[in-house]
Image (tube, rainbow, N blue to C red):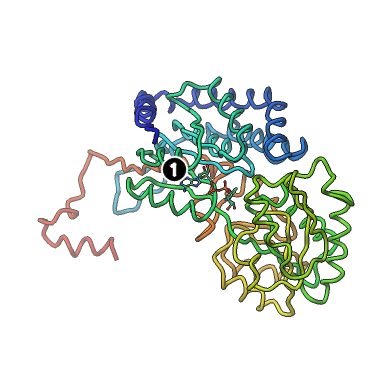
């Protein structure tokens, strides 16, 4: 197994020079990264096409454009974010002032998955740089072209002791996890998230875990069916369903189920054509293993639409399965593919009971015009984040911290949340030396009585 001790030691020494804390250095790094991404747009698009058959539209909106926006937002606000924050001081601390300093953790490890292989490596890096950290990035081994472009881009921009990319698979991850990092930011599956947290626990390294799970999507009887169908089809089939916050399964009210499904079929054809397997812009499944795993679900329940696949191209048609139950294999784990199982319900409590029996999801979507129903669902279910009357769109707002809860993850990022994640809040009390309050000490007459006037 490879040993990364000398690399981490190098980064730690560089961090100690305080170079990375200089705001001009951080802004310069962010700007360089932004320019390089713009200059490499075509190379990145080609790599994403080769790894996943991502269309240029998808590559730009969900990977390149997304990180450019995150960079622009961060560059614009960084100077205000890094300012020490003055806070109030209680009467018991009279004479002193209080403030919070934001400091970088040090050397951070960023581990990324394959489904948005560029964006999910670069977005956390933006937070790491903005907060003043050094970083080691471990991209996914399942998208080798994009990981290679990422490696070259970073190598051309930054010295190894500041930011570097380490390529490799599970063994490489494990070797990296043997080192003592100051922060670990992991995006990936729930089982590997547990491995990461266990490794981090050995050194008490703080972590962000961006994980997955089965994200429900509810279509209530009073939903705007046309828009619901379009927004769900888009959120589910973008990237061939290989999106951590894609609607995993649908709960549709039985009174509108047929009408909704008919509409859903129509919009899916509008989006991807009559023969999506021949659509040269439909994303493929990342590997043979995942392709086989997904194909094994195709005989669950009843096929309402789709169901076709092409083993050579590793593509699967947008598929809807009805008459599915929680006992079917497709309902046991996150699907992560273009297959949408549909459950129906008569009363909302059935939905809530069904969701509550399972781990807290990363996302939840509710389509209804009824405020009371919206509130009931939002109050009752714990989930990472989500939308009312939309899917996936919450992900792209820099004002909404993005992350999971419980099984779907720990911590959040994006926008200021990204900077906050990679910053330690150092609380400082600055005491006066002009006077000293005597009754804080144990040897003062009637000290306790006086203390009780303030601490009650
Ligand atoms: P994964 O957990 O298999 O891999 C993620 C990273 O961990 C990769 O870099 C991989 O090399 C490494 N890894 C794999 N096995 C490891 C092990 N045993 N020890 C140490 N490192 C290991 O995830 P994936 O298949 O690449 O991605 C799909 C998963 O990621 C889905 O569950 C999805 O929901 C989740 N995801 C979450 C988000 C989010 O933002 N919350 C975003 C995208 C994907």
In the rendered view, does 332 fall on the left or right side of 61?
A: left
Residue 426: quarter of image = top left
In the rendered view, does 300 fall on the left or right side of 264?
A: left
* In-front residue for pair 357/300: 300
Residue at the spot x=87%, y=65% of the render?
A: 262
Q: In the rendered view of the protein, which quadrant contains the C terminus? A: bottom left
* In-front residue for pair 372/30: 30
Residue 320 visible from this viewpoint = yes
**Label 1 residue SS:** strand
Residue 249 percent location from the top left of the image: 69, 64
In the rendered view, does 231 fall on the left or right side of 113?
A: right
Residue where numbered disc 1 is placed: 184
Q: In the rendered view of the protein, which quadrant contains the N terminus? A: top left
Residue at the spot x=55%, y=20% of the render?
A: 156
Residue 88 percent location from the top left of the image: 40, 48
Residue 394 visible from this viewpoint = no
For this orientation, the residue located farthest to the front is 312
Residue at the spot x=55%, y=21% of the render?
A: 157
In the rendered view, does 290 fall on the left or right side of 191?
A: right
Residue 360: quarter of image = bottom right
Residue at the spot x=56%, y=65% of the render?
A: 382
Residue 180 percent location from the top left of the image: 35, 39
* In-front residue for pair 239/442: 239
């Amino acid at each position: 197994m490879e040993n990364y001790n000398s690399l981490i030691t190098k980064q730690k020494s560089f961090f100690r020079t305080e170079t990375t804390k200089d705001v001009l250095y951080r802004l310069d790094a962010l700007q360089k990264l932004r320019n390089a991404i713009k200059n490499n747009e075509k190379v990145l698009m080609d790599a994403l096409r080769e790894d996943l058959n991502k269309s240029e539209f998808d590559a730009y909106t969900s990977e390149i454009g997304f990180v450019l926006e995150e960079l622009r937002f961060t560059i614009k606000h960084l100077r205000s974010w890094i300012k020490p924050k003055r806070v109030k001081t209680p009467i018991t601390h009279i004479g002193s002032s209080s403030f919070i300093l934001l400091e970088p953790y040090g050397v951070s490890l960023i581990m990324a998955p394959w489904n948005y292989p560029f964006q999910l490596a670069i977005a956390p890096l933006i937070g790491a740089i903005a907060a003043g950290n050094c970083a080691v990035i471990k991209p996914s081994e399942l998208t080798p072209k994009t990981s290679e472009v990422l490696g070259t881009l970073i190598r051309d921009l930054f010295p190894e002791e500041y930011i570097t990319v380490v390529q490799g698979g599970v063994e490489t991850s494990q070797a990296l996890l043997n080192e003592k990092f100051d922060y670990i930011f992991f995006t990936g599956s729930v089982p590997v998230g547990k491995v990461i947290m266990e490794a981090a626990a050995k050194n008490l390294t703080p972590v962000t875990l961006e994980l997955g799970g089965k994200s429900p999507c509810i279509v209530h009887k009073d939903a705007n069916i046309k828009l619901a169908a379009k927004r769900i089809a888009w959120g589910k089939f973008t990237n061939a369903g290989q999106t951590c916050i894609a609607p995993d399964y649908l709960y549709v009210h039985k009174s509108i189920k047929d009408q909704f499904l008919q509409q859903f079929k129509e919009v899916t054809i509008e989006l991807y054509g009559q023969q999506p397997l021949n659509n040269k812009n439909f994303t493929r499944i990342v590997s043979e293993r995942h392709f086989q795993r997904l194909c094994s679900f195709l005989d669950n329940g009843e096929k309402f639409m789709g169901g076709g696949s092409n083993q050579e191209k590793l593509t699967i048609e947008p598929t809807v399965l009805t008459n599915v139950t929680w006992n079917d294999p497709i309902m046991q784990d996150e699907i992560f593919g273009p297959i949408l199982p549909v459950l129906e319900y008569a009363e909302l409590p059935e939905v809530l009971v069904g969701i509550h029996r399972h781990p807290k999801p990363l996302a939840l979507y509710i389509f209804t015009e009824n405020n009371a129903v919206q509130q009931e669902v939002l109050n009752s279910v714990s989930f990472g984040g989500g939308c009312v009357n939309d899917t996936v769109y919450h992900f792209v707002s820099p004002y909404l911290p993005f992350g999971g809860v419980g099984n779907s993850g720990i911590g959040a990022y994006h926008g200021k949340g990204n900077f906050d994640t990679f910053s330690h809040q150092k609380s400082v009390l600055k005491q006066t030396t002009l006077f000293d309050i005597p009754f804080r000490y144990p040897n003062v007459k009637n000290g306790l009585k006086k203390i009780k006037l303030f601490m009650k």
